[in-house]
Image (cartoon, helix red, strand yellow):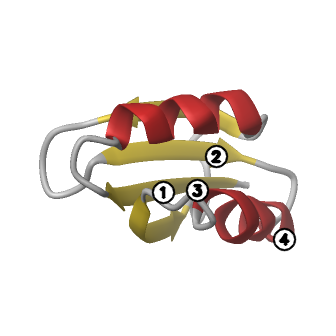
């Protein structure tokens, strides 16, 4: 299962947030700070939705510099 997580962070903290995610989250295949409406994008791959829930709620959203997340679950991966 794959998910795209868009993050809004406190000003000036997006690089730190992304670095922490890269270090802590083995399911994160991509974690980048970005310019635009959101401050970072994370792509997760996990065996089940429950694993993605655990990462989003217990790791990413617990970071004090993360203000908001928006998660998009991939319906059917391209082959």
Looking at the picture, how far across and down is residue 56, in whole percent?
65, 64
Q: CA distance from mark 2 to mark 1?
A: 8 Å
User: Answer yes or no: do the residues labelled 2 and 3 have beta carbons within 8 Å?
Assistant: yes
Q: Quadrant of the N terminus?
A: bottom right
Q: Earlier in the sequence, mark 2 or mark 3?
A: 3
Element at label 2:
strand
Q: Quadrant of the C terminus?
A: top right
Q: Earlier in the sequence, mark 1 or mark 4?
A: 1
**Where does label 1 land, which residue?**
5
User: Answer yes or no: do the residues labelled 2 and 1 have beta carbons within 8 Å?
Assistant: yes
**Where does label 4 land, which residue?**
50
Q: Nearer the viewer, residue 16 or 47?
A: 16
Q: Nearer the viewer, residue 5 or 73?
A: 5
Looking at the picture, how far across and down is residue 61, in whole percent?
58, 67
Q: Nearer the viewer, residue 48 or 22?
A: 22
Note whether 22 is above or below 74 in the view shown: above
Q: Earlier in the sequence, mark 2 or mark 1?
A: 1
Residue at 37%, 31% in the rendered image: 15
Please give left or right for residue 69 compared with residue 63 in the image: left
**Where does label 3 land, which residue?**
3
Element at label 1:
strand
Please tell me how crowded label 3 is: few (under 14), some (14-19), or many (20+) other residues with Cα within 10 Å: some
Q: CA distance from mark 1 to mark 4?
A: 15 Å
Note whether 47 is above or below 69 in the view shown: above
Note whether 22 is above or below 9 in the view shown: above
Q: CA distance from mark 2 to mark 4?
A: 12 Å
Quadrant hosting residue 10: bottom left
Looking at the picture, how far across and down is residue 78, in whole percent?
56, 43
User: Answer yes or no: do the residues labelled 1 and 3 have beta carbons within 8 Å?
Assistant: yes
Note whether 61 is above or below 45 in the view shown: below
Q: CA distance from mark 1 to mark 3?
A: 6 Å
**Where does label 2 land, which residue?**
44
């Amino acid at each position: 299962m794959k998910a795209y997580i868009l993050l809004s962070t406190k000003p000036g903290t997006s690089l730190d947030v992304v670095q922490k995610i890269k270090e802590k989250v083995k399911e994160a295949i991509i974690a980048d700070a970005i310019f635009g409406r959101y401050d970072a994008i994370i792509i997760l791959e996990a065996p089940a939705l429950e694993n993605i829930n655990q990462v989003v709620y217990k790791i990413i959203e617990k970071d004090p510099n993360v203000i908001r997340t928006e998660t998009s679950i991939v319906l059917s991966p391209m082959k």
